[in-house]
Image: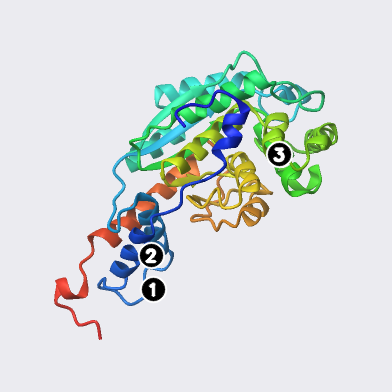
Amino acid sequence: MDAITSIDDFRAALAGLPQPDATALDGAAARNATLTKPAGALGRLEDLAIWYAGWRADPRPRIVSPQILIFAANHGVAQRGVSAFPPEVTAQMVENFRAGGAAINQMAATVGAGMAVHALDLDRPTADFTEAPAMEDEDFVAALATGWSALDPQCDLLVVGEMGIGNTTAAAALSAALFGGTGADWTGVGTGVAGAALEAKIATVDAGLARHADRAGDPVALLQALGGRELAAMAAAILRARHLRIPVILDGFICCAAAAPLAVAAPGALDHAVAGHLSAEVAHAALLDRLGKAPILSLGLRLGEGSGAALAIGVLQGALACHSGMASFAEAGVSDG
């Protein structure tokens, strides 16, 4: 599928998902067994290398062209005081990304990743999801289409990040709707809210859940009702990566919440993705547990922007450098016992 032009297109893209290449998986596992190290000595790095090899259909791969996509949007629920920052900060941070001044810019440069920023109608926030679906069909399809087309088919690894004042509220509401629970179970401090502001944030999530209870059991409809343009774009980019067999490193709570509808709608839809890190956002661990993802890093990050996933690119690069570059026992003339 070259483009997303309707919600039905997106639903159709969730069916018949490509699988990893079995020959490459077997070849990578066989190579791993011959490398100059004790069996299992590189721990999870070995598993990551074999996983990546399967999706790239290459038993001895390397990462050459990683891509980081940042999607930015504004949320109608921000007017309810759910964030410590005003909505204007979204546009200001977009300019910072484009000027190269944000944390994610430095991390992208460090791991040699290309980076693109997509601002999604910042002057037109989504609807307040306590009163109406966050996105009408036209806006939802436009966000999905942006995410789908933003992916460079020539990249060999994808990280998606976000910026959007109010989007931890959307992520909490979407997680609760998909996996059960209340606002209190899934809502954290986000950009630093506390006290009455945190209580208002929890109440906003609960109100959104009640407003859209009729959409329970339909992950795509829940993404439209409770998500935001940037969450929809992230979900579409991750799904497009699956169709192109491009591995994905998931970022923190918001990214995982954006990806979660895919996993619920089509079990196994995130098999091409690993969790880059465990963030400090209170519900991220629970969400990773629901998704069956073990984080690569745990550094107490809660920045967003794709920052934790970008750092994890370096770990995956190291795993593949060892897997593809190390000598075998035979090549090195070392006895394997």
Q: Are marks 2 and 1 in contact (CB under 8 Å)?
A: yes
Left/right of residue 19 with respect to residue 199 in the rendered view: left
Task: Indicate the quadrant where residue 220 lies.
Answer: top right
Task: Indicate the quadrant where residue 81 lies.
Answer: top right
Residue under pointer 3: 174
Report the amino acid beneath label 3. Answer: Leu
In the rendered image, the quadrant that contains the C terminus is bottom left
The picture places residue 109, in percent across and down from the top left corner, at: 34, 36
Q: In the rendered structure, find residue 221 and report the number of the disc placed on it.
A: none
Q: Are marks 2 and 3 in contact (CB under 8 Å)?
A: no
Between the C-alphas of marks 1 and 3, the distance is 38 Å
Residue drawn where x is 27% and y is 57% of the image? 60
- Crowd tier of the residue under label 1, counting other residues whose Cα lies within 10 Å: few below 14, some 14–19, many 20 or above: few
The picture places residue 211, in percent across and down from the top left corner, at: 84, 31
Q: Is residue 316 above or below residue 195?
A: below
Q: Are marks 1 and 3 in contact (CB under 8 Å)?
A: no
Q: Nearer the viewer, residue 31 or 41?
A: 31
Residue under pointer 1: 40
The picture places residue 28, in percent across and down from the top left corner, at: 32, 63
Q: Earlier in the sequence, mark 1 or mark 3?
A: 1
Residue drawn where x is 62% and y is 30% of the image? 8
Report the amino acid beneath label 1. Answer: Gly
What element does badge 3 sit on?
helix
Q: Is residue 189 among the parts visible in the rendering?
A: no
What element does badge 1 sit on?
loop
- Crowd tier of the residue under label 3, counting other residues whose Cα lies within 10 Å: few below 14, some 14–19, many 20 or above: many
Residue under pointer 2: 46
Q: Earlier in the sequence, mark 2 or mark 1?
A: 1
Task: Indicate the quadrant where residue 244 lies.
Answer: top left
Q: Earlier in the sequence, mark 2 or mark 3?
A: 2
Residue drawn where x is 34% and y is 41% of the image? 110
